[in-house]
Image (spheres, coloured by chain):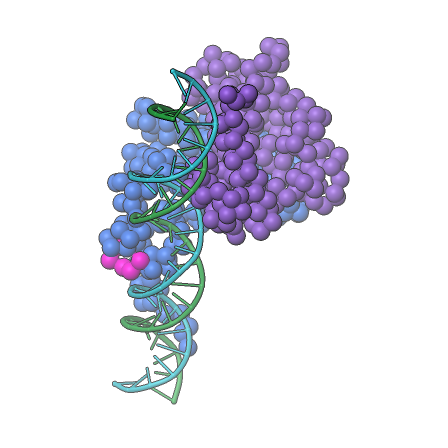
Chain colours: A purple, B blue, C green, D cyan
Amino acid sequence: MSIQPDRRSRKRLATREGISDVATRLFKERGFDRVTVDEIAAAADVGRMTVFNHFPRKEDMFFDRDEEIRETLRGTVRQRDPRTSPIEALRLLAHRLVEEQSPYVEFSTASQGFIETIEGSETLKARARAIRDEIAQVVTVALTEGAGREPADPAAHLAANLLLATWTVAYIQAHQTFRQSRDTAKAKAAFLAMVDKGTIGLKAAMAGTPYA
Amino acid sequence: MSIQPDRRSRKRLATREGISDVATRLFKERGFDRVTVDEIAAAADVGRMTVFNHFPRKEDMFFDRDEEIRETLRGTVRQRDPRTSPIEALRLLAHRLVEEQSPYVEFSTASQGFIETIEGSETLKARARAIRDEIAQVVTVALTEGAGREPADPAAHLAANLLLATWTVAYIQAHQTFRQSRDTAKAKAAFLAMVDKGTIGLKAAMAGTPYA
DNA sequence: TTCCAATATGTACTAAGTACATAATTTGTG
DNA sequence: CACAAATTATGTACTTAGTACATATTGGAA
């Protein structure tokens, strides 16, 4: 029979990526709210229901990568050097991501399109905020389970949200810097400077907890 | 020509409040997503288009108070004792609101319904997050204009978002505390303790700026 | 082949929100 | 008071996202 036993999943993945690729292109070209699901289906040459089969929400075609981010944050907290605090480990992660040219923090012309597409749509902004909250929840759980505390620990909840607030603002400000200077190095420096500033505050707020 | 009629605006306000009252009641009873705009219009005895005339979004009938909050925060930063830093003034505001039994931070059985209605609906949660971001923007502007800086000052942007993150988590955690203990005093103490903790971090992060 | 299960797609519907037109009401002015 | 102008309420028709459910199609195994 077939040499590849999972042709089925490959086809499904191809369909999925075909849809999200064409949708993302259209969103960047014309703005999220000026593209209908019907148009996406036509452009991707699939039925409308196939689109909703793969992506329950229209926004999901655009944000198709957030599971990776969660995994990275979880792994950073879990697999850190035990002599390093979780908060410090996350600060170092930010520096490593920038150094390694991770696509999440590249601040280039390409990523400008991404940010600007989000900024251009209330729906996408809302989804971005929801994802941010979901990530904060992941970080909360990672912090508490490493410290042998309840997942409802208020300090962890606060720490995770302060962290995400810092990273979000740093990310937006770095893009702002890039937009003005067209200088990736400068934008990266701005990003890391703000992450470090936020981390100072976060450590001060978490003094006396296992997170700082 | 009309200068300022009175009956007219009073009637309009009455229509508006009639809609938002009946809508809020229905949302709390049955959940936001299980009430349609048509039902609200019928229950408030107005036409469907009248509802959308007053409230462009369904969520606006529920969140009908956020302008007050903005004004309070703006005023607190603007009209503070010049010897008090903006961040400290906002911390004191939190304490004053609790002391004065402000409905925003009352942590009673009544306010439980409010929180739980929000938690029960993705749409309401999304709107709550959007309002939080709008308020952060207001605080950013208030901070910068008091310090003679550009409204785009990254430090102010960070400060405002850390502040809102702290208050939001403190608010949620205080409600959690109330839910478990049914003890308003305990919930208020939890709220203020976390606001104070966050403020310590915020001041540390803002060291060297005019905001701390 | 033949059957099963995963996948793609069609049909019909609900409900929010928008555009635009019209009716009803309030109010200033002659 | 009557009437014109503006404001407010409402109706009609439409668009679009999203859901429920049925059907068709396709890959893989026996």
Percent x, y for residue C29? 40, 84
Judge whether residue A2 is colored magenta. Answer: no
Answer with left or right where residue D13 lies relative to residue A63: left
Which quadrant would residue D20 be assigned to in this image? Answer: top left
**Magenta stretch containing residue B46, yes or no?**
yes
* Residue A157 vertical position relative to residue A122 in the rendered view, above or below: above
Q: Position of residue D18 (x, y in %)?
A: 40, 42
Q: Is residue A193 above or below residue A31?
A: above
**What are the residue bounds of the magenta stretch?**
B44-48
Q: Residue at x 59, y 32 (%)?
A: A166
Q: Quadrant of the C terminus of chain A?
A: top right
Quadrant position of residue C18: bottom left
Is residue B204 shown left or right of residue A99? left
**Nearer to me, B68 or D3:** D3
Image x and y of residue A191, in percent: 67, 33
Q: Residue at x 29, y 42 (%)?
A: B34
Q: Residue furthest top?
A: A82
Mostly what secondary structure, the magenta segment?
A: loop
Q: Residue at x 26, y 40 (%)?
A: B30
B161 is higher (above) or lower (below) than B15: above
Q: Nearer the viewer, residue A73 or B20?
A: A73
* Foreground residue among B184 and B114: B114
On screen, residue D8 above or below A86: below
State whether residue B75 appears in this view.
Answer: no
How many numbered markers are drawn? 0
- Please state which of residues A15 and A109 is positioned toward the viewer in this rendering: A15
Residue B68 location in percent, x, y?
43, 48
Q: Is residue A151 visible?
A: yes
Instruction: Give the residue displayed 70% in from the left and 39% down from the top.
Output: A108
